[in-house]
Image: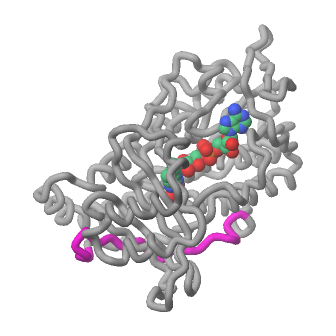
Amino acid sequence: MAGPTVAIGLARSGYEVKLYEAYARRVQDVGSFFNLAPLGRKVLETLGIADRALKSGTICTGITFQNHKGRWLAKNPETTTNIMRGELSAALREAAVAEGVQLFTEKRLDALTERPDGSWELGFADDSSAEAGIVIGCDGVHSDVRRLALPQAPGASYAGVVGSGGLSEVGEQFKVDGLFHMTFGLHGFFGYQTIRPGTILWFENHYEYEERTMAELARLSNAEWVGSLVERHRTDPGVVSEVIKASAGEVWRWPVYEVQQLEQWHRGTAVVIGDAAHAIQPHLGVGATLALEDAYELTATLRRQPDAAAAFAAFQADRSARTKEMNKQAQRMGAFMAPRHWWQRTMRDLILPVAVRSAIKRSEQGFGYRLQPWPPAGQIA
Ligand SMILES: Cc1cc2nc3c(=O)[nH]c(=O)nc-3n(C[C@H](O)[C@H](O)[C@H](O)COP(=O)(O)OP(=O)(O)OC[C@H]3O[C@@H](n4cnc5c(N)ncnc54)[C@H](O)[C@@H]3O)c2cc1C
């Protein structure tokens, strides 16, 4: 998300931009979907690429919440977008290439050396190399740029959550109503949207305190994984199991990782942004939006302050309060996900409608955050 977006911003600001991506395979095929919050769309609209980037997405005109007994709790009327991760990624890369960004795939960064003049030498897993005046690590939660440029920074840690997602083929009883329907199940959180007649996108998150790696989860057959989710939601409203059982094709699953707030997001003229700097727990559904905001704001900062080292320090100072706040909100939402005791669930059901109303109000105000127009581009240092 962050990589092609900041590449677009910097190409428009007069930089020569090269985007190195580890994977070669068609990014459209890379797993599952996510929900893009209003500010994520706003970034794309402000850049004039929203229609193109989100063309394959489905608009959600609201998010509804029910509890494990099927009791209606609250509705968030914000308009968001559900979109396949790979489709958005591919569209953003195409938009970046159209802006003159040079895209290199199958280039997995595995070495980064700062030269005495402050520029960087990059080494890749295929033994090729490159050089750069500025390095922006947009390489996600397991960031190699973070590991190489900021060796003191903590790595990714398991967030205690396993996520799943899939596409289901269902009957006419599921209406295309524009809503994203969420259920606080007894042992996991579930959401679905009917994106067209007969087709549903769904996700499920649950706590697993013992970490299972991606490879361990992948070893389970589809039928085993579906069976375990159905069992987990056995006592929840029937729609949860019905949708999961109707999965067509592979059900995606992942252990979820987070990155504790870094003390430093930058060293000299290298910086990390997006999940590489601040992967938060997934319960708020704003990780991609924060990555897009970072890309927008980093461009703004470099236009204001073309000295990269100074710009990166200013960027971190501006952005860290926002990402800390969103992390706090995500943790709060996570505590609601599957409380162990009945009285905690009762409290949640009482608090949630009020919390959602107050979150909507704060979200309308961007949780105190506003995108500012880019300043005119300064002279590149
Ligand atoms: C289960 C789950 C559900 C989620 N749901 C939502 C949601 O509903 N809404 C939402 O907003 N967010 C959601 N998120 C979070 C969201 O996916 C991330 O916050 C977002 O993708 C971060 O964007 P990014 O650009 O920082 O990193 P990424 O999107 O992770 O991109 C990193 C890129 O770097 C590449 N890369 C990695 N290492 C290297 C290397 N060494 N060399 C070259 N390239 C490399 C990768 O291939 C990838 O293309 C979810 C996350 C999870 C795990």
Q: Position of residue 191 (x, y in %)?
A: 42, 67
Residue placed most toward the observer, 266 or 64: 64
- In x, y percent, where is residue 317? 51, 31
Q: Residue at x 34, y 48 (%)?
A: 207
Extreme-left residue of the structure? 343
Q: How is the image coloured?
A: one colour
Residue drawn at 56 percent across, 38 percent down: 141
Residue 55 in the magenta stretch? The answer is yes
Left or right of residue 377, residue 190 in this image:
left
Residue 29: quarter of image: bottom right
Relative to the observer, which residue lies in front, 1 or 371?
Answer: 1
- Is 239 inside the magenta-drawn segment? no
Where is residue 19, by image quadrant? top right
Q: Is residue 187 above or below residue 138?
A: below
Lateral position of residue 3 relative to residue 18, left or right: left
Where's residue 138, x and y in %? 66, 38
Identify the residue at horizontal 60%, vertical 26% (top origin): 146
Q: Quadrant of residue 90?
A: bottom right
Residue at 65 percent across and 20 percent down: it is: 148
- Residue 240 placed where, x, y %? 37, 72
* The C terminus - image quarter: top right
What stretch of residues is rendered in magenta? 53-72
Q: Is residue 301 visible?
A: no
